[in-house]
Image: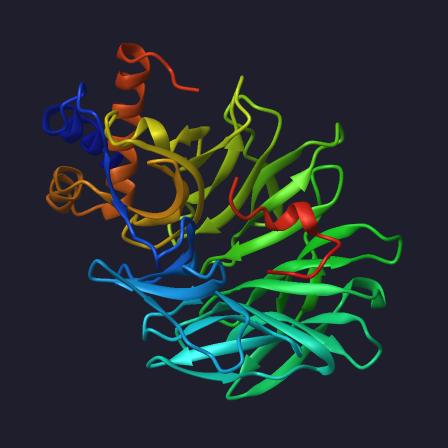
Amino acid sequence: MPPSAAVLTAFLFTVPLAAASLFVVTDLGSLGGSQSTAFGINSQGTAVGAAQLPSGMGSAFVSSGGTMTALSAADATSSQANGINSSGQVVGTVYSFSGARATVWTGGLFSNLGTLGGVDSYALAINDAGSIAGSAGVRSGDAHAFLASNGHLTDLGTLGNSSWSAAYGVNNSNQVTGYSTTPDGAFHAFRWDESAGMVDIGTLGGNSYGMAINDLGDVAGSSASPQGFLHGFVWSGGMMKDLGTLGGGSSSAYGINGSGFVVGSSYVPESANTHAFLWMGSGLLDLNSLVPIDSGWELNAAYGINGNGQIVGSGTFQGQTRAFRLDPLGVALNAAAAIPEPGTFTMLAAAVVLVFVARALSVPSRQSCRDIVSNAAQEPG
């Protein structure tokens, strides 16, 4: 029996199809205010993001072991953490009266990365070697994507010598994705590496925005369709695939893991709110349909996913916007561990599909957080 068939057979007998969920939802807490959002997660399940303090100011945080801890920075009026690597280094942006500064926290201690000669800078992603991607002001007053290693910022340029670019993702081969203006004023997603430089990866018909990149060089992001609606995409092997929506007009993809699974947010029919989604190769799955029905959560957006299938984002819980982490249920992981190929999270994917279909047949359907690309013409972050 081929591995794919073995997977489906195993889960038909190990996962109860009437089960309520494939993921457990964890509230990552707060810093005393009413809002928090998680933007990144590392291989150990440690999450980072931004949360409101009792004063109303936003603060970068790291959440581990059930505890949310504020990340401090001198002279900060607010801050936000965007990424974390396997060593626990955190990157983000610190805002003060003097401007915005790309920042890295190591062991809780912060340091600013500087700029490319201009005023502001923003750190948006970090890989396991500590290379950091972001955007920084240049002397002309424009902003360019950068890759920082050992404290040195490399200007990645723009598409067609235009005025603006920003890098939102970096993988462990120092390949970078983001988006740039083009000479005609549009925004196009790019992939950059040292040998090829910045390469336009195309669009679905309108502007496009690269948000995340995995170690295979696959890019997740969003692009406007010819009709003008944003749709999440995955770019792989030179081809851009439209991920569609959850039935609403638009969607945005924000994170991708090494298996090529994508997370993001999408509008749903008859609702002003977005729902977090998971894509595993065929159609978007509403993550609200994969958690306990009585969880009390409406999961609005998913921003990061690691290789273990843990997902972070933000949702509505008890009337507040709260950061969440989703953890795959042990039954799925334990069943997957008994089948050597093709890998743990691929096994989980089969279980997700089976339970999603079962719930769609037995449970009435149920009808926003940071939308990076909606402000594409403005500063990143």
Picture layout, residue 266 above or below residue 140: above
In front of the other: 127 or 33: 33
- Left or right: 279, with 68 as reference point: right
Q: Residue furthest right?
A: 184
- Left or right: 169, with 22 as reference point: right
What residue is shown at x 34% (from left), y 62% (from top)? 42
Rendered image quadrant of residue 85: bottom left
Instruction: Work out whether residue 1 can be spotted.
Output: no
- Left or right: 108, with 270 as reference point: left
Picture layout, residue 125 above or below residue 264: below
Q: Residue furthest front?
A: 55
Q: x and y percent of residue 318 in the render? A: 33, 36
What residue is shown at x 82% (from left), y 75% (from top)? 141
Image mark count? 0
Q: x and y percent of residue 236 in the render? A: 55, 48
Instruction: Work out whether residue 209 can be spotted.
Output: yes
Q: x and y percent of residue 1 in the render? A: 19, 31
What residue is shown at x 48% (from left), y 66% (from top)? 171
Rendered image quadrant of residue 245: top right
Rendered image quadrant of residue 50: bottom left
Q: Please identify the quadrant where the C terminus is shown.
A: bottom right
In front of the other: 44 or 9: 44
